[in-house]
Amino acid sequence: MNQYDLIVVGSGPAGRRAAIQAAKLDRKVLVIEQGRRVGGVSVHTGTIPSKTLRETALNLSGWRERGFYGRSYRVKEEISAEDLRRRLLITLDHEVEVLEHQFARNRVQHLRGKASFLSTDTMEVLKDDGEAVQVKAKSILLAVGTRPFRPDYMPFDGKTVIDSDELLEIEKLPRSMVVIGAGVIGIEYATIFSALDTAVTVIDPKATMLDFIDKEIIEDFTYQLRDRNMKLLLGQKVEKVEHLPDGKVSVTIDTGRKIITDMVLFAAGRMGATDSLNLAAAGLDSDNRGRLKVNPETFETSVPGIYAAGDVIGFPSLASTSMEQGRIAARVAVGAIAKEPPKYFPYGIYAVPEISTCGLTEEEMKERGIPYECGIARFRETSRGHIMGLDHGMLKLIFSLKTRRLLGVHIIGENATELVHIGQAVLNLKGTVEYFVENTFNYPTLAEAYKIAGLDAWNRMGELPKGDAHHETVQLTDTNTSTTVETSVTSEKKKTSSR
């Protein structure tokens, strides 16, 4: 039997980062991947494909240039599903090549097959040729990810009623589409196809969408979607989905409304891919969505020596956070020191338009009773926004009135997922509104919106009061990790000197 220091099941963001981290610490590592190629859901059906599809759609449709040339402007008149797939295949090949090179360079062993537990430290790997191989390790990390939730009542056929994985294999672009589910995945794909001029209707039983995002951002987002004729049927439940003889699909809602469409995308949740792992043999069990519970600091499960990271442990289910979870879990598993990452991390939604957020929302500030002020900048107020022809886009900064510290940054619009990192750095480094007022930003850039928003807040907050330094403690709840931290902040008066 082959003996390892760490076995990693799954080669997505959490798995590959964990494997490479352990290998860099001179541990013997084995990665087990049941897919045809390494990379996991993130590379083959999730993060990379959806973002590549988005970029291709925006480029070929001429979406970014319509502010100048009108809504009828298109780079390519007839866009096909093959046009979208061509760029996707090139991107995926590159991602897999990079990952395979990283494994080879760090001497990470890789075994293709389906893994299942025999005991707490032993797994069986069933290879494609039917051979069963047993492997053993001091520690095991489960990074198996998730798959689309497929309820029995939904008549999936892979062509006109599909899940988010099957979307990448469609043969032609639909003229109309119903998206069931207004979560991140559903909204991303709904807005991408809307940018391709598909008539999109989004249905969700909840009366609101993306509740973890600042309400003002969602209001702006909703306005933009409705302005381009997307239908948002929130607070309404789908009762029946039927195939029609002419190849179309009928969707009946509990209000009695019936929608006839070319395609239905079911994107209402995902399931942890744990059902084939034989968790019982290791003394583990999962919740009703196949997810595993872990210690949020070490990512160890209830069974010593077995860890889990990535989407399989639930929120926030981001590739970026999954990588850090895998890295920390690997260090703990092999006995190395693992530092806790900064409390605030960015959340990106790659819809059209993009949304990105970091820190506390305005609603959370109110719930915690923290006196605050906001600063707003519209992208159209920047010279770069004029150059790009942007009619929409907004950056919102939230500051504590007592400490003047930045506590939240929320962005909607072009490059939101890139711009958010400036706010993230200031937030984690406990910067104040004065940073944005006094700092110099490249001109013309969209990043200049930070200065505009900072000045907007500063105008309402006024000068930093003169006098002795004031010291106060503010209790904040980190929404990303659901942990409460005590933040001590000292604000000193600005000292002047003759020069």
Image: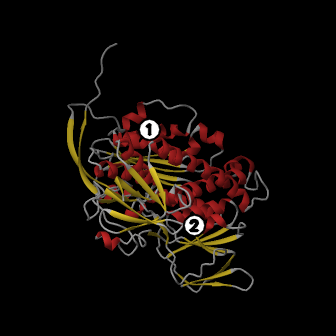
Residue 164 can be seen, yes or no: yes
Mark 1, residues whose alpha carbon is within 10 Å: few (<14), some, or many (≥20)? Answer: many
| Image spot of residue 288 (x, y percent) | 38, 76
Say which amino acid is labelled 2.
Asp
| Image spot of residue 221 (x, y percent) | 54, 59
In front: mark 1 or mark 2? 2
Q: CA distance from mark 1 to mark 2?
A: 45 Å
On screen, 89 above or below 132?
above
Residue most extreme to the front: 1
**In front of the other: 173 or 149:** 149
Report the disc number at residue 363.
none
Instruction: Check the picture and name the quadrant holding the N terminus.
Output: bottom left
Whether residue 76 sits left or right of residue 382 in the image: it is right
| Image spot of residue 125 (x, y percent) | 44, 65
On screen, 259 above or below 454?
below
Residue 12 can be seen, yes or no: no
Residue most extreme to the top: 499
| Image spot of residue 326 (x, y percent) | 38, 52
Q: Which residue matches tag 1? A: 455
Q: Which residue matches tag 2? A: 165
Report which quarter residue 403 is drawn in: top left
Q: Residue at x 56, y 81 (%)?
A: 154
Say which amino acid is labelled 1.
Leu
Report which quarter residue 433 is drawn in: top left
Q: Earlier in the sequence, mark 1 or mark 2?
A: 2
Q: Secondary structure at mark 2?
A: loop
- Number of numbered discs on residues: 2
Mark 2, residues whose alpha carbon is within 10 Å: few (<14), some, or many (≥20)? Answer: some
